[in-house]
Image (spheres, grey):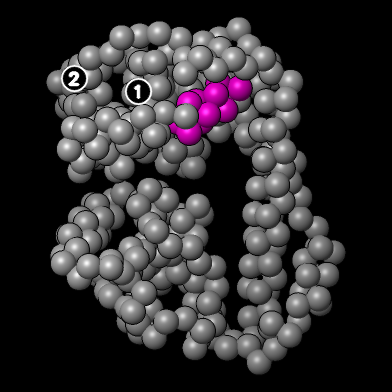
Amino acid sequence: MKKTITAILIFVTAFLFCPEVQSAVLLDRVVATVNDEVITWSELMNIILLDGRKYISSKDDRSREEKIHELERPFLNMLIEMKLQTQEAKAMGLTVQDDEINSAMSDIRAKYNMTEDAFLASMEKEGITIEDYTKEIGNQILLQKVVNYAVKGSVVVTDKEVEEYFNANRELFNNEKDKFRIRQIFFAAPADDSQRKDIEVKAREIVQRIKNGESFAELANEFSEGPGRRFGGDLGYISSGSALAEIEKAADALETGGLSEPFWSSAGLHIIKLEERVKAGGVEKIRENIREKLFRKAYELKYHEWKTELKEKAYIEIKL
C-alpha cells in the first residue's frame, strides 16, 4: 500500500495545486479509442498540465503552446497504456474496496497535516468534486494492483541466480571497501553560469519539500537529471573512492537516513540522502544488492513485455 500511496501523491498533489487545469477552456473531442473505451481531448490536456507542468510552467504563451503540442503524443501513449492496464485489471476481476480508498485518503491528509474539513475545503476551492477525487485514487490503486498481480508477483530471483552472478563477477567484489548507498537528485551544470542561481533556488525548494515530509524518491523521479532517476534517484552501493569527492565528503557527514544540503561538483548540483553504510566484508549485503539488481532487471523486462502484449491484442485507434 505504501508504494500505491506514493504513486497517488504525485497525481493528487499536482491536481490540488494546479489551477491551470481548472481555468483551461477546452473543446472536447475523442483523441483515441482503446478497445471499447475512448480518451478525450480534455483528459489528455489535464494530464499534460498536471504531469508535464515542469516542462511548461516557465514558458511564455507561444512557447507553452508549442511545448504542449510536442507533449501531446507521448502523453497520449501513456494514457493508452493506463487504459489498457485498467481494462486488464477489470478482466482479471480486480477491484478496489472503499476502505482502501478511505485509507489512502487518510494517509494523504496525514501527509499534508490537514484535517478532513480543511482537505475538503481545498478541493472545493480548486473546483474538484469528492467523487472525481475518489475515482482517481481508485484508478491509481487499481493500476498498482494489476501490475503487482500480472508482473511483479511473478518475478522471482533464485539463490542460484544470485550465486552465479556473484561468481561471474567476483573480481568486482575483491578487495572490498566500505560502501554507502545513496539516493541523489541531480541537476547538470549549466552552460551559462548565470543560470546557477536559478538551479540553486529550485534545489533549496526541493530540500524544503523533503524536510516537510515529501518522498525523496518521488521528487527524484520528477526532477532529477541524473542516473537512477527512474528508481527514485537510487544509485545503489558505491565503494569508497569510486564516487565524486564532493559526494563522498557529503555522504561521510551524514547519519543513515540523513539529507544533505545542495552542493556543487564539477558535474552539477547534488542533493543526496544516505540510505545505508556497509562495512567491508559484508557479503550478505552484497548478495542482497545483487538480488535487488537482478530483480529490477527482470521486472523491467517482464513489465515491457506485458505492456507490449496488451497493445498487440488490443484495438487502438488514434485520432490526434
Sort mark 1 into few (<14), some (14-19) or many (20+) by Cα contacts within 10 Å.
many
Q: Where is residue 305, by image quadrant?
A: top right
As measured in the structure, the alpha-carbon distance from the residue carrying label 1 to the one carrying label 2 is 12 Å
Q: Position of residue 63 (x, y in %)?
A: 24, 37
Q: Residue at x 18, y 19 (%)?
A: 23
Q: Is residue 164 above or below residue 53?
A: below
- In-front residue for pair 55/99: 55
Q: Is residue 106 visible?
A: no
Question: Is label 1 in contact with label 2 (beta carbons under 8 Å)?
Answer: no
Sort mark 2 into few (<14), some (14-19) or many (20+) by Cα contacts within 10 Å.
few
Badge 2 marks a residue whose secondary structure is: helix
Q: Is residue 283 above or below residue 318?
A: below
Q: Position of residue 120 (x, y in %)?
A: 21, 21
Q: Position of residue 256 (x, y in %)?
A: 40, 72
Q: Position of residue 82 (x, y in %)?
A: 54, 26
The region drawn magenta spans 74-84
Q: Residue at x 67, y 25 (%)?
A: 311
Ranked by sequence position, the earlier of labels 1 and 2 is 2
Main secondary structure found in the magenta portion? helix
- Residue at label 2? 23
Q: Residue at x 50, y 67 (%)?
A: 235
Q: Where is residue 12, by image quadrant?
A: top left
The disc at residue 210 is none
Q: Is residue 256 above or below residue 103?
A: below
Residue, far bottom: 175
Q: Amino acid at mark 2?
A: Ser
- Residue at label 1? 45
Badge 1 marks a residue whose secondary structure is: helix
Q: Amino acid at mark 1?
A: Met
Q: Is residue 253 visible?
A: yes
